[in-house]
């Protein structure tokens, strides 16, 4: 089973602030994903990557950048945070591009004041 | 409209009873995952399904790709089953194992 960790687990910032959320997976998966979860919605895909240096746009990418530095590490960047980005953020990984189970990290709760 | 519709949106039952949750898909789902989000917010993998059925303890899930639905049955519900259940579908052409999530079923147990 994939081990996916996220840091920080909780973060509070102010409008206009700069935030980086970190994700690491230790099961040698190729694919990694960033989702956000808001009340009344399921999880929505922000960005994903199929390997170091690769980045693909998800369904709700506006206001977010991401970078995949290694196979293990995937970062989500909010360069000018806004209150609308207050959310619970999940990272996930899978080992193939289709027909592969995704495994999720514990989540990061971000509050933008 | 929603590509993945979960029903019911909420369910409140007594301990020891049985229940059924459902997801209907308006996309051509090829695989389905079911998760439990516990009260701490963590997502727990319950099932990963290609068309067919799987069973794990008191939980049983089925996925029918031709009729575009999946079900999750909980037998003899216990307090630890409380939380929000999500289904998520993978569909061809979406690229790279992308999942589309339903909005969840909030499941509460009455002691």
Image: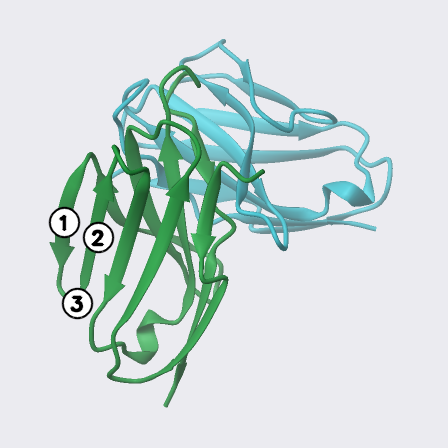
Q: Subunit of mark 3?
A: B
**Local SS, label 2:** strand
Q: State which chain is coloured cyan.
A: A
Contact between marks 2 and 3 (CB within 8 A): the answer is no
Distance from disc 1 to disc 3, alpha carbons, whole Å, reads 11 Å
Q: Earlier in the sequence, mark 1 or mark 2?
A: 1
| Residue ID for mark 2 | B61
Do tags 2 and 3 sit on the same chain?
yes
Distance from disc 2 to disc 3, alpha carbons, whole Å, reads 10 Å
Residue A83 percent across, percent down from the top left: 81, 45
Give the vertical position of A22 relative to B17 (above or below).
above
Do tags 1 and 2 sit on the same chain?
yes
Give the vertical position of B74 relative to B77 (above or below).
above
Residue B103 percent across, percent down from the top left: 52, 50
Residue A63 appears left or right of A113: left
Q: Nearer the viewer, residue B90 or A6?
A: B90
Residue at left offset 65%, top offset 24%: A61
| Residue ID for mark 1 | B54
Contact between marks 1 and 2 (CB within 8 A): the answer is yes
Colour mode? Answer: by chain
Packing grade of label 3 (10 A; few <14, some 14-19, many >=20) is: few
Q: State which chain is coloured green.
A: B
Residue B31 appears left or right of B11: left
| Residue ID for mark 3 | B58
């Amino acid at each position: 089973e994939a081990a996916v960790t996220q840091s920080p687990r909780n973060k509070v910032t102010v409008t206009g602030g700069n935030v980086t959320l970190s994700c690491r997976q230790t099961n040698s998966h190729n694919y990694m994903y960033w989702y956000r979860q808001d009340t009344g919605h399921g999880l929505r895909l922000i960005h994903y990557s199929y390997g170091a240096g690769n980045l693909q746009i998800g369904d709700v990418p506006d206001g977010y950048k991401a970078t995949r530095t290694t196979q293990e590490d995937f970062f989500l960047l909010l360069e000018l945070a806004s209150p609308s980005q207050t959310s619970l953020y999940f990272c996930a990984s899978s080992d193939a591009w289709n027909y592969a189970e995704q495994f999720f990290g514990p989540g990061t709760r971000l509050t933008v004041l | 409209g929603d590509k993945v519709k979960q029903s019911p949106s909420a369910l409140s039952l007594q301990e020891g009873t049985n229940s059924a949750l459902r997801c209907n898909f308006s996309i051509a789902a090829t695989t389905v995952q079911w998760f439990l989000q516990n009260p701490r917010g963590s997502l727990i993998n319950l099932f990963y399904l290609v068309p067919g059925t799987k069973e794990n303890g008191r939980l049983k899930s089925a996925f029918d790709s031709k009729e575009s639905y999946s079900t999750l049955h909980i037998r003899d519900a216990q307090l630890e089953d409380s939380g929000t259940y999500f289904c998520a579908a993978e569909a061809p052409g979406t690229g790279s194992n992308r999942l589309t999530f339903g909005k969840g079923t909030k499941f509460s147990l009455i002691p």
